[in-house]
Amino acid sequence: MKERFFDVAKKFGLVALVAILSICFVAIGLMIGFSFFGGGDDPLSILSIDNWQAIISKFTGN
């Protein structure tokens, strides 16, 4: 029983690690893309809510 718990915990830890790394890589990719290709001055500004509201409003027309 204890061995099975450690197996499940190890797999859960691996899934959590992959999820965290994926989120980090997406954020880094957004910052690089916005600063180089999007003409943004500050790479961290893409992570602000105001920018995301402007991006979403462009696609939805609101």
Image (cartoon, grey):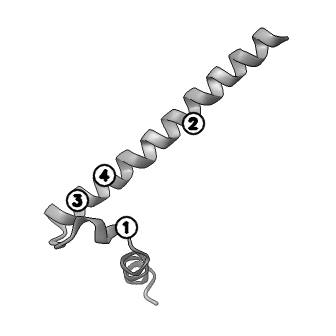
- Label 2 element class: helix
Mark 1 or mark 2, earlier in chain: 2
The percent position of residue 44, horizontal first and vertical second, equals 29, 66
Q: Are marks 3 and 4 in contact (CB under 8 Å)?
A: no
Q: Residue furthest right?
A: 1
The percent position of residue 8, horizontal first and vertical second, equals 71, 21
The vertical placement of 10 against 47, above or below, is: above
**Disc 3 from disc 4: Cα separation:** 8 Å
**Disc 1 from disc 2: Cα separation:** 22 Å
In the picture of the structure, the residue carrying the numbered disc 1 is 47
**Disc 4 from disc 1: Cα separation:** 10 Å
User: What crowding class fits label 1: few (fewer than 14 Cα within 10 Å), some (14-19), or many (20 or more)?
Assistant: few
Amino acid type at circle 3 is Gly
Amino acid type at circle 4 is Ile
Q: Residue furthest bottom?
A: 62
In the picture of the structure, the residue carrying the numbered disc 4 is 28
Mark 3 or mark 4, earlier in chain: 4
The vertical placement of 11 against 51, above or below, is: above
Foreground pick, 10 / 39: 10
In the picture of the structure, the residue carrying the numbered disc 2 is 16
